[in-house]
Amino acid sequence: MTTTATYKNLLVETQGKVTILRVNRPEKLNAINRETLAEIADAVKAFVADDSQGALVVTGEGVKAFISGADIGELQPLGPAAAEDISRFGQAVVELIERSPKPVIAAVNGFAFGGGCELALACHIRLASDNAVMGLPEVKLGIIPGYGGTQRLPRLVGPGRAFELVLSGRPVKAEEAAAIGLVNRVVPQADLLPEALKLAGAIAANGPLAVEAAMECIVRGMNLSLDQGLRFESGRFGILAASEDMHEGLQAFLDKRPANFQRK
């Protein structure tokens, strides 16, 4: 692995075409404060801008916590204006992940509460360790999810389950999270990062322009009618036909050899 940047609260490394971002605040169970959010934003922007990187894996350092939530000590003294400001800032950072043109995979190891759960919700794919516990417990503290949780959770698991989980604040263990579609699948703790890296590597080995186009079709299509989505898909299919990568991929298949994609 190669370290790509130095941060106070993150560990960011690359492994081939995959970037690994670890939130590294073990004394706070990887809780995120404003400084950490700013570092995450910087790291995600750097990943998106790096044409050599095809997928991002986000996880927490250690085995206890992915991101245990927002730093409550930082939130407690805030007044209305400052609270709205940190909510908007957190939403903007999380949105960078959701809008990444390249896939972001959450490897949820341990606790993922509050802001940590909200960050995971914005990732395109979520894998969870068998000891993972997720939830949005903000109402227990007299607040609400402020980094997009009330908006992304119902879109992912349906409004009925979202009402239950947000209004009760109850935690969800890994197996239930998989059953309701909150995570894609559950793996043993020791296998979590290797499985996330395996998946990320498989995606990053594919045609990068095709991966980005497919992601755009999925994201935009969810907000379009089926007919509009199909038209958008055909348009992107046509655009890809102008790329060198498409012709390389098809020829490689005919030649029975690995494709050499160049993002062109």
Image (cartoon, rainbow, N blue to C red):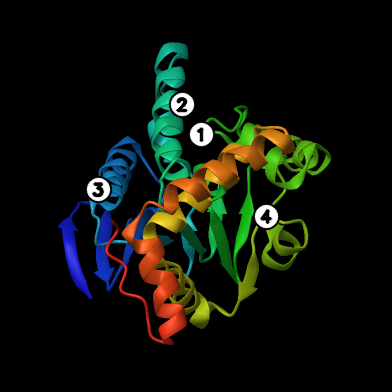
What residue is rendered at 48% in x and 60% in y? 105
**What SS does tag 2 mark?**
helix
Q: Is residue 93 left or right of residue 11?
A: right
Mark 2–mark 1 Cα distance, whole angstroms, equals 6 Å
Which of 201 and 257 lies nearest the eye of the viewer?
257
Query: Picture quarter containing residue 2?
Result: bottom left
Residue 49 got which mark? 3
Mark found first going from the N terminus, 2 or 1: 2
C-alpha distance separating marks 4 and 3: 29 Å
Disc 2 and disc 3 in contact, CB within 8 angstroms: no
Contact between labelled residues 2 and 4, with CB atoms less than 8 Å apart: no
Mark 3 surroundings within 10 Å by alpha-carbon count, few (fewer than 14), some (14 through 19), many (20 or more) = few
Under mark 4, the amino acid is: Leu
Residue under the image location 77 percent in, 62 percent down = 179
Q: Residue furthest top?
A: 81
CA distance separating discs 2 and 3: 26 Å
Which numbered disc, 2 or 3, marks the residue that appears first in the sequence?
3
Q: Position of residue 109 (x, y in %)?
A: 51, 66
- Locate residue 10, reporting x and y percent: 28, 55
Residue at label 4? Answer: 182
Q: Nearer the viewer, mark 4 or mark 2?
A: 4
Query: Whole-Å distance between the Cαs marked 1 and 3?
Result: 24 Å
Marks 1 and 2: in contact by CB < 8 Å? yes
Name the amino acid type tagged 2: Ser
Q: Are marks 4 and 3 in contact (CB under 8 Å)?
A: no
Left or right of residue 125: residue 259 = left
> Residue 147, which numbered label?
1
- Please tell me how crowded label 1 is: few (under 14), some (14-19), or many (20+) other residues with Cα within 10 Å: many
Q: Quadrant of the N terminus?
A: bottom left
